[in-house]
Image (cartoon, helix red, strand yellow):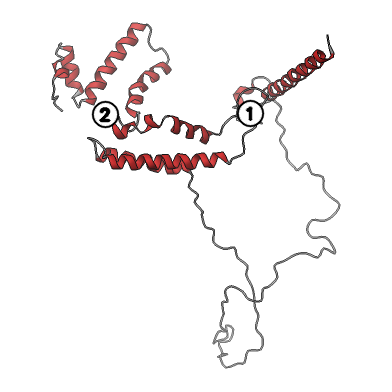
Amino acid sequence: MSPEEKDRKIERLEQENEALREKIAELERRLGLDSHNSSKPPSSDGLKKKATIIRTKSLTEKGKRPSGGQLGHPGQRLEAVLQPDNVVEHPTPCLCSSCGCDVSQIEVEKMITRQVFDLPCLRIIEQESWAKSMKKVLLLACNYKHRYPKGIPQNIVARLSQLYEQILKRGQDYHQFQPPLTRKGNRGRVKRRVGHNLLLRFQNYKRDVLRFLTEPDVPFTNNQAERDLRMMKCKQKISGGFRSFDFAVSFANIRSFLSTASKRGLNLLEVITDALQGNLSVFFSSNPTT
């Protein structure tokens, strides 16, 4: 083996050794996690629970010096200012609080001043990021969707698309000047921030996000689709669900039947009664009764 090959082999082995060290450190860190140093519940500790030591006193040893300022310490305080921001005068009373005699004509012999230092009122500074601006634009577009159910005017669509592009440009400029995240190891791409990933999805799927502006049949959200699928997910979580595939198909058919009737504004009880009697003509009528 030539010296060059030996050097390359040593370099490769050093890289593999470093990667293995990082992997071992990560595994040891995971093994060391429990309910005391992580968000894991106490039930996950198992039989290797550490003995909990109840501390009744501080572990700090008592010092030889007494508490407080030491002898010879100069101390610090707020010195009085020559020109305070606000002056409040407390006039002398006209009557003595003890005997009730009139003291308004007695000459003042001494004046005492006090200065009180107070913090100014806190003021909340709101800094709106591109995500909040995007939320406002999409909510505005949703309002136009409800205002013009048959189709949003083209000038409004163009203006909303322009605002959409401006917010994307602002978000790109913001993330461009952010310091990059560190990468563990030598392989894989550098991770992006959560907001950066959302920004890229807004950019890459712009046509899908704004499709509801140009197509009246497309809703603003996919909530209806999620509601249609939610019952099937709930059935998966119920203990002792479907015992066979045929039962699952029957359940899906019934749910689809009722969902379609509800979307068309039909009375569910009447639709079920008609279906049991073999009458499904209401689904094929052009103007269903509500």
- Give the camera-side residue of 160 and 118: 160
Position of residue 46 in the picture relative to residue 248 (left or right): right
- Give the camera-side residue of 80 and 72: 80
**Of pointers 1 and 2, the one earlier in the residue sequence:** 1
Q: In which quarter of the image is residue 148?
A: top left
Rendered residue at 30%/42% (across/down): 156
Q: In which quarter of the image is residue 257?
A: top left
Q: Could you tell me which secondary element the residue under label 1 belongs to?
A: loop
Judge the density around disc 1: few (<14), some (14-19), many (≥20) Cα neighbours within 10 Å: some
Rendered residue at 69%/25% (across/down): 29
Measured from the top left, where is residue 90 in percent x and y?
57, 80
Position of residue 252 in the picture relative to residue 29 (left or right): left
Instruction: Identify which amino acid the numbered label 1 is placed on.
Output: Ser
The disc at residue 217 is 2
Instruction: Identify which amino acid the numbered label 2 is placed on.
Output: Asp
Q: Name the residue under label 1.
A: 35
